[in-house]
Amino acid sequence: MLSTALTEDETRTLHENYLHLHAHPELSMAEHGTAQYIQERLNELGIENFISGGTGVVGIQRNGDGPVIAFRADSDGLPIKEDTGADYASVDTGVLADGTEVPLMHGCGHDTHVASALSAAQVLARNTENWSGTVLWIFQPGEETAAGARAMLADGLWEKVPHPQVVLGQHVFPFQTGSIAVTEGSAMALADSLKVTLYGKQSHGSQPQDSVDPIVLGAHIITRLQTIVSRELHPLSPAVITCGTFHAGLKENIIPDRAEFTLNIRTLTEEVRAQVLAAVTRIINAEAVAANAQAPLIEELYNFPRLYNDPEQTQSLAAAFGQEFGTDQVHFSPPAMGSEDFGALADALDVPNVFWMFGGFDLSNGPAPVNHSPHFLPDYIPALDTGVRAALAAIEYYVSKKN
């Protein structure tokens, strides 16, 4: 059995790592300082490592013959101004691709993920007599934009390391520390983000007969898109279609010549995804024809792959979590309509993966703020304890010598 109780020095290092990472978030695919910090910590542990996908880090922790297990922790922050009041709050800024300077925050807990993984690696390093095999530590950039997993795969990730038999990952969530949520099968949604440009004909606001109004066209499109879920999909096939932005015009008495809006689409299966995307395209183009407008331009911004938890492996790890935390602290949850690019790593090798959520808050203090909120701040001491123990419980299931 692994000794999961951290020593005083290990606990101090765990907290120092978290506090440093929290105070210094970086934008997706720009995690240069974070990658350097991770490499320094892995070097201190004597773990072989290399850069992958630009700003990702892969550690290879070898300990004799045995299973090969991959464990992924994402590392990017978000363009959010932190409003937590913590004395270790981020005041860092970053620059978006268009040159805009933005505040930065670890508003989704990726700092917790990295710190927990580094600590789990440290525990394995001092427990070599109790496990055997190889653990691949995948510190992945760019999860928030779905770019990171693809970048690491394109950089030949699986050509540079032994192939794992399973890929594991976890995410801090706003429920009680010391508890774990797992989902069998489809766990998180596929996601597609689109930018749509509508072309009209500009005229004076008092002369609408001389215009093709892209604002009215956009209003009809966005309203009708909601009928896809309510009238085209089977009631038991979940999907979400959200219009997140709409931009048109410069003055109230000018009908503009174009409008732009963005869509975010969530589905749980490839079949429903294809059906919804086809319907979105059909409606956009048909409404343009009805308005006597030029054909719109539909551009893909990004998409997230499926996240499918292997049922057998999920059941096995749920039992392992039950042994670590108590069976009353392990809960089976329905699929979430949020998205993750984690699944791309295992899908590339056609091996199973398991992804779970762990609690990061003391709910006796009231409801916790949700991920991506400027107020999102896990109670880091018990949250990190939960994250480290969950990671080790899952890894131990595969590599412990008692098996």
Image (spheres, grey):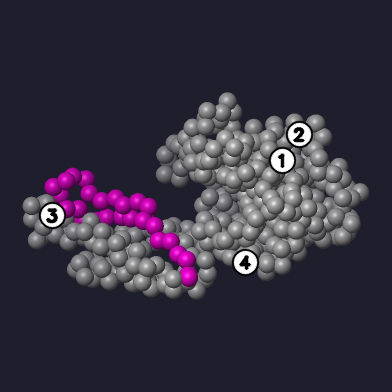
Rounded to the nearest angstrom, the CA distance separating label 1 from label 2 is 9 Å
Mark closer to the observer (1, 2): 1
Q: Which residue is labeled 3 in the image?
A: 203
Mark 4 and mark 1 lie on one chain; the one further toward the N terminus is 4
Q: How many numbered marks appear? A: 4
The amino acid pointed to by label 3 is Ser
Rounded to the nearest angstrom, the CA distance separating label 2 from label 3 is 67 Å
Mark 3 and mark 4 lie on one chain; the one further toward the N terminus is 4
Residue at 37%, 68% (x, y): give it: 230
Mark closer to the observer (2, 4): 4
Stretch of the chain drawn in magenta: 236-262
Q: Which residue is labeled 4 in the image?
A: 185
Mark 2 and mark 4 lie on one chain; the one further toward the N terminus is 2
Residue 346: x percent and y percent?
Answer: 66, 63
The amino acid pointed to by label 1 is Asp
Residue 134: x percent and y percent?
Answer: 81, 55
Q: Nearer the viewer, residue 120 or 162?
A: 120
Q: Which residue is labeled 2 in the image?
A: 11
